[in-house]
Amino acid sequence: MNKKYFVEKRGAGEYAVLKPNAKRASALAATQAEAIRLAKQFGSEHPDIERVRHTSVGKPDKWRGQ
C-alpha cells in the first residue's frame, strides 16, 4: 500500500515529513534528501516535495513529485 507523505522545509532549516492534514511531523531531518529517504521508508513511494529554490519550472511555493 502506497501511503502519501509530504516533505516541507521548516523555519529552522530542517525538513519535516508529514502525512496529509497532520498537525505534527512524522519525522524531522537535517537535509531534504534525508527527509525524502524517511518518507520512502514510511511507505510513500513518491512523496510530494516542497520546492526550496527558484527554478525554470517552479518557485518555492510550489510542490514537486519525487
Image: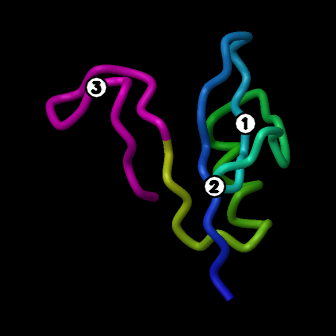
Q: Distance from label 1 to label 2 (Cα)?
A: 12 Å
Q: Secondary structure at mark 3?
A: loop
Q: Position of residue 24 (x, y in %)?
A: 83, 39
- Residue 59 shows which numbered tag? 3
Q: Which residues are magenta?
A: 50-66
On screen, residue 32 versus residue 59, left or right, reads right
The residue nearer to you, when weighing 20 against 63, is 20
Q: Amino acid at mark 3?
A: Lys
Q: Quadrant of the N terminus?
A: bottom right
Q: Is residue 32 magenta?
A: no
Please name the predominant secondary structure of the magenta segment in the image.
loop
- Residue linked to disc 1: 16
Q: Secondary structure at mark 2?
A: loop
**In this picture, is 37 found above or below 2?**
above
Which of disc 2 and disc 3 is earlier in sequence? 2
Q: Identify the residue at horizontal 55%, vertical 59% (top origin).
A: 47
Q: Amino acid at mark 2?
A: Pro
